[in-house]
Image (cartoon, rainbow, N blue to C red):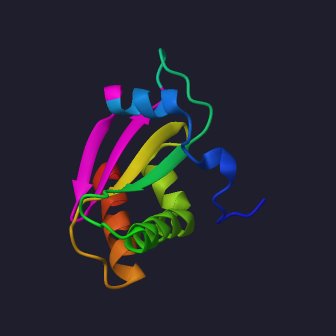
Amino acid sequence: MKINGYPFHEKLKKKYEIDLLFDKGKWLSVDNIRIIHLRSSEKLTIDTHRIGVSVSKRFFKKAVDRNRIKRLLRESYRLNKSVYIDAFGDRSIAMLFWASKDLPEHFSVVEKQFLDLCKKRSG
């Protein structure tokens, strides 16, 4: 298996997991990126880490723009997966959001904000 992959079993797709995440998860924000995350506990057993991505249709009417931002968010996660796992744990579920009305200029902007988010969580 690829070290820097984003395989299907890491994608947050199940409705009951997303509902659970929004019911009991904790929010964290850095600049334009927001995350809601939930770690495994005694009552809640999560077997692996899963992550989803979302961009508001309210801010970005064109699907092209939404898809580009989602690609950038997934890529920043994929390349910095080890940093994410150190910060949020290997048994957690999370969802990333882009919380700005502006398109990011470059991938480096998104990646820097993602790394700052992970540092804020772990530090």
Q: Quadrant location of residue 39?
A: top left
Residue nearer the viewer, 17 or 78 = 17
Residue nearer the viewer, 118 or 64 = 64
- Where 119 sits versus 8, above or below? below
Residue at 24 percent across and 54 percent down: it is 29
- Where 75 sits versus 47, above or below? below
Residue furthest to the top in view is: 43
Residue nearer the viewer, 100 or 46 = 100
Which quarter of the rendering shows the N terminus?
A: bottom right
Q: Quadrant location of residue 53?
A: bottom left
Task: Say whether residue 21 is left or right of residue 103.
Answer: right
Q: Position of residue 6 (x, y in %)?
A: 63, 59
Residue furthest to the bottom in view is: 105
Residue at 31 percent across and 64 percent down: it is 116
Q: Position of residue 81 (x, y in %)?
A: 54, 60
Residue at 40 percent across and 32 percent down: it is 21
Task: Say whether residue 9 is left or right of residue 91.
Answer: right
Q: Is residue 46 magenta?
A: no
- Where 21 sits versus 61, above or below? above
Boundaries of the magenta span = 23-40
User: Magenta stretch mostly in which secondary structure?
Assistant: strand
Residue nearer the viewer, 107 or 14 = 14
Residue at 43 percent across and 44 percent down: it is 94
Q: Where is residue 3 in the image (x, y as percent from the top left)?
A: 69, 63
Task: Say whether residue 53 is left or right of residue 78.
Answer: left
